[in-house]
Image (cartoon, rainbow, N blue to C red):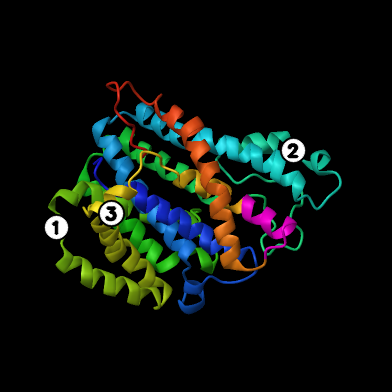
Amino acid sequence: MHRNNFNVLRLLFATAVIFSHAFELLGMKDPLEQGSASISFGSLGVCGFFMLSGFLTAQSWSHDPHVWAFLKKRALRLYPAFIVASAISVFIVGPLGASTQHYFGEWSFHRFLSDLVGLRQARTPAVFAGSPVPSVNGAMWTITFELRCYLLLALIGFFTLAGNRWFILFVAALLNTLAISRAPLAAAGEGPALFGISGFMLWFASMYFAGAAFYHFHAVIPMRKALALPALVLFVAALFGPGWLTRAATVTAGLYLLHYAGQLQFPWLAKLRSRDDLSYGLYLYGWPVMQLAARNLGIRTPLVAFVFVMAVCWPLATISWRVIESKALRLKYARPAGQIPVPN
């Protein structure tokens, strides 16, 4: 698994999210969203994150099928960097973009702690007045759904079903059937709830368990160019179709393409692989840097904003990985000296 391109794909997904936000936070739709019926480049990046996360965490469970060990690994992957990014967003970015003179007087410490525990985007007093999305770090909103997917897989594991590939396939098929018919893509609003479960939760869980099911059956799924090419044509065409078709193609053709790309072995791809997984840091810091750039530097051109944010966030993500994330991952379990942890 160390010779895959998953780190490269995660970087691509995070870059797609930042690219899309460069348009969104300047009051525009990104180029894909302008032409498609219901999806943006940022939404595609999030889809990729969740499907890949389902694959990797299902793999993690199969290697160590114990609920508390699984939850410990997931917590170490998500919480440390999230806590630091939340604190920076609230205590530095928030005051810089405050729309009130009494920012800290209106700020709630208890609400801040609640948001940290639930891995929710930080709620602050009014910030970035005039922004199309006046939030201090709107990108964080998906992380709580990642946590919920982990908890759902752990619950299934508690009943000793997480390693049963046919049960995981059944869960994935059920969730995707419901999601295709009811839940939204990110650009289309939350969608109707089902038995108290939000449309967004259906959306994220359907992709996560599609990835988990792919893991359980990946050994019998051929990765061939002859299959990847028609899958690419189908996937691209579906992006410009109705929302249900886009969703169906994402968790079938899109999922296949993700793993086909993940196993490609080219010398130039090998050079792109890195032990530093910067995707989480890019994802966490892209939004607040973009907000500050738009407000304080007056950047109003999406492509200029995208290049600027990437230039600023790359070193921030490097620091996040080397100082926080990689050190937290070393606490997952004892490993032979010199072995590099694989984030999952």
Asked if one can make out residue 203 in the rendered structure from this viewpoint, the answer is no
Quarter of the figure with the N terminus: top left
x 70%, y 45%: residue: 93
x 75%, y 63%: residue: 130
Picture layout, residue 50 above or below residue 238: above
Picture layout, residue 234 above or below residue 105: below
Task: Give the mark, 1 or 2, whose residue is nearer the N terminus.
Answer: 2
Q: Which residue is mark 2?
A: 108
Q: Which residues are magenta?
A: 288-299
Question: Looking at numbered disc 3 in the image, what kind of residue is underneath it?
Answer: Trp
Q: Nearer the viewer, mark 2 or mark 3?
A: 3
Question: Looking at numbered disc 1 in the image, what kind of residue is underneath it?
Answer: Pro
Give the class, few, some or many, for how many residues have Cα within 10 Å of label 3's Cα (few <14, many ≥20). Answer: few
Cα distance in 3D space between marks 1 and 2: 53 Å
Picture layout, residue 207 above or below residue 315: below
Cα distance in 3D space between marks 3 and 1: 23 Å
Which numbered tag is attached to residue 222? 1
Q: Which residue is mark 3?
A: 268
In-image side of 4 versus 131 (left or right): left
In-image side of 219 versus 111 (left or right): left
Asked if one can make out residue 323 in the rendered structure from this viewpoint, the answer is yes
Q: Is residue 164 magenta?
A: no
The image quadrant of residue 224 is bottom left
x 31%, y 43%: residue: 56
x%, y% of residue 325? 46, 34
Task: Give the mark, 3 or 1, whose residue is nearer the N terminus.
Answer: 1
Give the main secondary structure of the magenta stretch: helix
x%, y% of residue 254? 31, 63
Quarter of the figure with the C terminus: top left
The image quadrant of residue 177 is bottom left
